[in-house]
Image (cartoon, rainbow, N blue to C red):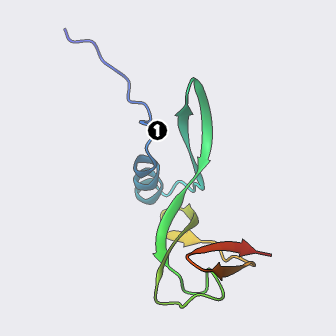
Amino acid sequence: MPQRIEPKPSGEVIATLIDSLYNDKPADSFETSFFNWKIQAPIYANVMNNGTIPNLPDNIAVETHVKVDGKSIHYRRMQSQIKFTGMSCCIES
């Protein structure tokens, strides 16, 4: 008789995203390993800006911290502005 191996999280964010959407389990972080430590890492996803970052156009994609549940992927609006300096940018409060 083969031995049963219990499923366990892979440490990849996609597993948490799918589980949250399919099973309506709200999540804004996922468990992953960092060397020998188990940590909770925030979930980031690429979404249409739609006001997430106020001084960027709405019709561009931005990578931001999200909350996921059975209804959707919900982005969090930032209160900060993005300041562009040459070829780089930084977040300004």
Considering depth in this image, is 71 or 43 the residue closer to the camera?
43
In this rendering, would 90 be left or right of 59? right
Considering depth in this image, is 38 or 27 the residue closer to the camera?
38
Quadrant containing the C terminus is bottom right
Picture residue at 41% right of the left edge, 47% below the top: 15
Q: Quadrant of residue 10?
A: top left
Q: Quadrant of residue 6?
A: top left
Give the residue type at disc 1. Gly
Picture residue at 43% right of the left edge, 44% below the top: 12
Picture residue at 65% right of the left edge, 89% below the top: 55
Quadrant containing the N terminus is top left
Q: Which residue is mark 1?
A: 11
Mark 1: few, some, or many residues within 10 Å (few <14, many ≥20)?
A: some
As displayed, is residue 44 above or below residue 19? below
Q: Residue furthest top?
A: 1
Q: Where residue 22 sits in the image (x, y, percent)?
A: 40, 57
